[in-house]
Image (cartoon, rainbow, N blue to C red):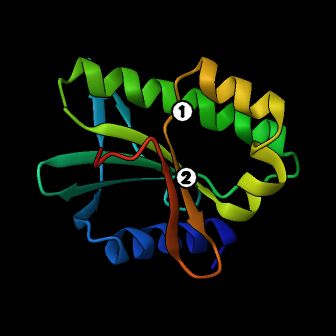
């Protein structure tokens, strides 16, 4: 099983442990353009918890270049957010990333500035314990 699939499963397990229900893939449509997850790479989950609805773009950052993978993740995140607004789906979108990648790379100034500039919500998942480490911002507050 490819590494990307393994992190998808890790995020799914973390959401379940965090109390989220009805976790399913999400297909989006924008006037005939369908956006869907490539099952062997980037995953997009939906989950419902009480009255909260989220959409999660899962990124494992297994590419040779973290910067390249980050560019790709931000582009996808922005497009998914745009289509969610277009469809009037009241879901908060998050970019799920492994804790190890966040600590080693995404906490650096360049990545932090880009996340702020592009208003990216993060779901940081501990890739060892398969638990939610941190929501930025927390959807329950």
Label placed on residue 93: none
State the image coordinates of residue 99 (x, y, percent, origin top left).
67, 62
Q: CA distance from mark 1 to mark 2?
A: 10 Å
> In the rendered image of this protein, does residue 19 appear above or below residue 109?
below
Is residue 95 visible in this depiction of the protein?
Answer: yes
Which of the image's four quarters has the N terminus?
Answer: bottom right
Residue 7 vertical placement versus 25 (above, below) = below
**Tag 1 and tag 2, C-beta contact below 8 Å:** yes
Q: Secondary structure at mark 1?
A: helix
Q: Describe residue 75's horizontal placement relative to residue 94 as left or right.
A: right
Circle 2 is placed at which residue position?
42
Seen at 82% across and 28% down, the residue is 110
Whole-percent x and y of residue 93? Answer: 38, 38
Q: Label 1 belongs to which residue? A: 76
Which is more toward the observer, 103 or 64?
103
Bin the neighbour count of mark 1 within 10 Å (Cα to Cα): few under 14, some 14-19, many 20 and up: some
Residue 67 on image: x %, y %:
82, 37
At numbered mark 2, what does the secondary structure look like: helix, strand or loop?
loop
Q: Which image quarter: residue 65?
A: top right
């Amino acid at each position: 099983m490819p590494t990307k699939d393994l992190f998808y499963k890790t995020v799914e397990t973390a959401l379940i442990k965090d109390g989220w229900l009805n976790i399913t893939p999400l297909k989006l449509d924008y006037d005939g353009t369908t956006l869907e997850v490539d099952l062997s790479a980037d995953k997009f989950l939906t989950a419902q918890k009480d009255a909260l609805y989220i959409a999660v773009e899962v990124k494992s950052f297994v590419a040779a270049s973290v910067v390249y993978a980050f560019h790709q993740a931000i582009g996808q995140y922005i497009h998914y957010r745009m289509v969610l607004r277009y469809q009037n789906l009241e879901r908060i979108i998050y970019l799920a990333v492994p804790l190890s990648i966040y600590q080693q790379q995404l906490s650096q100034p360049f990545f932090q500035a880009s996340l702020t500039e592009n208003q990216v919500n993060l779901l940081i998942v501990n890739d060892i314990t398969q638990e939610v480490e941190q929501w930025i911002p927390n959807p329950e507050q």
